[in-house]
Amino acid sequence: MSKLFKVVLNTLPRPLLIRLSYWVKPFFKYALRGNKYSDPIDGRSFSKFLPYGYINQRENVLSPSTLSLERHRLLWLYLKNETEFFSKNLKVLHFAPEQAFYKRFKKLKNLAYTTTDLNSPLADVKADICDLPFEANKFDFILCNHVLEHIPDDTKAIQELYRILKPGGTAILQIPQDLNREQTFEDDSITDRKERERIFGQYDHVRIYGRDYFEKLRSVGFKVEEVNYTENLSPEEINKYRLAKGEVIPVCYK
């Protein structure tokens, strides 16, 4: 199954993958039913999760029901347990909305919820993150997860995110990050697709972020909390929810 998933992920365009996922979810939910692992987003339990990864496949990480990955389940637990996201009236902007969240957030009565992306079929507003069509100080809460590693001018993108966030607002800006690496690495001279996949993890990633990512956010104006939320959870919970121990959530304030 791992080899099949790898071929599908590296062959089909992401919009098509999103559409196809709606058809295959019922099969996986039935075939993998059990009680060993749980998805906190919908509360369903399974005997195992699915593999996922474009280059190096990670086993037992993709939820059969919500199609969430480790980062989605960690973020859900953080939002639910540590914020007022599900109770306070908020204007929310969600970039490249993840399927695991989209319908659930859209149904929340307390949220004025807007989605945006250049290519996602789930986007309300088609927009370039480096040139957003929103007024300054508009949103109370911004979610922009695993987007910036695709953006050549990420400084401009971060400046735009800061501009449209209200004073006192919160932005969660997750990225794939190597916490053992001090400095972010990028090299535009590497143009071969396979080589970019090997070095950056995906052919369409333009950098590998290091620990200096947090300082980059601060240099634009954000106050940044580096939240290692798995520290709040037991080893049993980390395994039950299939989380990545030590993953840091960048929680940014204006």
Image (cartoon, grey):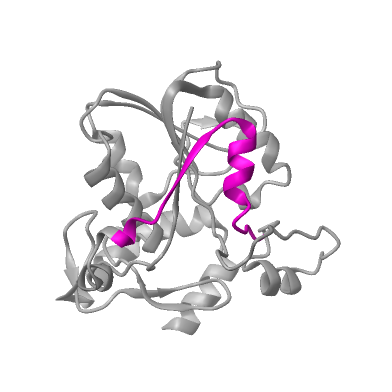
| Residue pictured at 59% horizontal, 22% vertical | 133
Relative to 204, 125 lies left or right: left
| Residue pictured at 41% horizontal, 83% vertical | 1
Relative to 32, 253 lies left or right: right
Magenta range: 208-231
Q: Is residue 132 visible?
A: yes
Question: Residue 253 appears at what percent x and percent y?
Answer: 46, 32
Q: Residue furthest left?
A: 35
Please say if 84 is above or below 247.
above
Q: Would you identify the image quadrant in which residue 241 lies?
A: bottom left
| Residue pictured at 22% horizontal, 46% vertical | 81
Question: Residue 21 appears at what percent x and percent y?
Answer: 38, 60
In depth, the one of 181 and 175 nearer the eye is 181
Q: Residue furthest right?
A: 189
Relative to 148, 61 lies left or right: left
What number of labels is visible? 0
In depth, the one of 89 and 54 nearer the eye is 89
